[in-house]
Image (tube, rainbow, N blue to C red):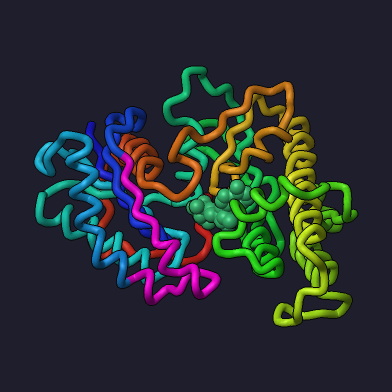
């Protein structure tokens, strides 16, 4: 079964063709980062307009790269949320239009679930279940016990900022550009990770939940002085900025790794599946040592992409065997797994 995937939840316009949920024939991502960079974050209205302009060319490119025509596609899968509602609507309406005109079924899939599915794609080894799914993205930080594709139990999540969001905000404090994660990783290489004793927050009575907002405030005070706010001037030099970046990155990842280990042990998980943009970090991959087999997303599957949407869409359709209705709506908020 050939599935055309479409992804427009935020600032990437993406389309992909995937065979039988597994074999990626093409995976095209057009990033809007340069357009949003001067604003220090994604501007939803600009994102919508860019999605409208380039969705069809991106789909066309995905078909050409896969060497298939629209007539050969059997199913359309689209990210229905969570994400920015305007950008989501562009992708969803594109999928509905193609579905209607071509007489093809379409399914809306959960973007967060797709990030987890990305770690399963193209792996040589078989994933052993139950697995612990670890979502580390700009919008989510979750620990999920997974019995199979489609069977999930959330056992930990952030109570405030998502980890990627914390990286983006800390980058802003340090005067680095958007998106912050890769910038912090680069700067951290020149710094000492034990220079500042930062630590992520604990959530009372919920040892597997995350809290990054206190860590972000600790960075703010270290860089701009006690009781400073976001617009206050930076009071440290370049060397100290690198130390802050390294110490923050280490503290955030140590917290994740500790909780991942605890959760896997507590839930009797037999492998670890990582998903989301933050898993692009080389440093995280170096630090994450465990005895369990670890599955990281392959090349091009960490950050937002449509191959993971097409791959998961295949399984959703195998289960339901029915197309979603043409009045399917975008869901901007969290979707229950
Ligand atoms: O999964 P993603 O592409 O979008 C969401 O669904 O949110 O993740 C984007 C997030 C951003 O917050 C970005 O700063 C973070 O992933 N990120 C990183 C790295 N590369 C991307 N965070 C830490 N280290 C990195 N190397
Ligand atoms: Zn994402």
Residue 121's spot in the image, x, y percent?
43, 30
Pick the front one: 196 or 319 = 196
Q: Residue shown at 34%/54% (left/top)? A: 30
Q: Residue shown at 30%/60% (left/top)? A: 91
Q: Is residue 266 left or right of residue 58?
A: right
Residue 224's spot in the image, x, y percent?
81, 74
Please say if 214 is above or below 231: above
Q: Is residue 207 left or right of residue 130?
A: right
Q: Let me know if residue 209 is in the magenta part.
A: no
Q: Residue shown at 29%/35% (left/top)? A: 18
Q: Residue shown at 47%/18% (left/top)? A: 124
Residue 27's spot in the image, x, y percent?
33, 41
Pick the front one: 8 or 151 = 8
Q: Give the range drawn in magenta.
A: 27-48
Q: Let me know if residue 47 is in the magenta part.
A: yes
- The answer to which image quadrant residue 132 occupies is top right
Residue 231's spot in the image, x, y percent?
70, 82
């Amino acid at each position: 079964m050939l599935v055309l995937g479409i992804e427009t939840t935020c600032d990437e316009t993406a389309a992909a063709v995937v065979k039988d949920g597994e074999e990626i024939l093409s995976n095209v991502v057009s990033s809007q980062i340069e357009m949003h960079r001067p604003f220090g974050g994604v501007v939803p209205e600009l994102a919508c307009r860019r999605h409208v302009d380039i969705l069809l060319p991106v789909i066309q490119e995905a078909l050409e790269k896969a060497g298939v025509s629209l007539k050969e596609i059997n199913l359309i899968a689209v990210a229905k949320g969570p994400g920015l509602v305007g950008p989501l609507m562009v992708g969803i309406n594109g999928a509905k239009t193609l579905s209607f005109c071509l007489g093809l079924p379409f399914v809306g899939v959960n973007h967060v679930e797709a990030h987890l599915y990305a770690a399963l794609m193209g792996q040589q080894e078989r994933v052993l279940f139950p697995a612990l799914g670890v979502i580390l993205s700009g919008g989510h930080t979750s620990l999920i016990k997974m019995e199979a594709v489609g069977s999930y139990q959330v056992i930990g999540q952030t109570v405030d900022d998502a980890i990627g969001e914390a990286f983006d905000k800390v980058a802003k404090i340090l005067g680095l550009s958007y998106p912050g994660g890769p910038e912090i990783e680069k700067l951290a290489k020149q710094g000492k990770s034990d220079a500042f004793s930062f630590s992520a927050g604990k959530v009372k009575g919920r040892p597997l939940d995350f809290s990054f907002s206190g860590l972000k405030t600790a960075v703010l005070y270290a860089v701009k002085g006690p009781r400073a706010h976001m617009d206050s001037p930076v009071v440290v030099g370049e060397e100290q900025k690198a130390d802050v970046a390294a110490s923050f990155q280490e503290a955030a990842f140590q917290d994740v790794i500790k909780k991942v280990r605890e959760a896997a042990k507590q839930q009797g998980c037999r492998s670890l599946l990582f998903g989301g943009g933050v898993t692009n970090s080389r440093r995280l991959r170096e630090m994450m040592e465990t005895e369990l087999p670890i599955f990281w997303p392959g090349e091009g599957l960490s950050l937002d992409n449509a191959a993971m949407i097409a791959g998961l869409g295949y399984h959703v359709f195998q289960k339901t065997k029915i197309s979603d209705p043409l009045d399917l709506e975008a869901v901007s908020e969290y979707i229950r797994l």
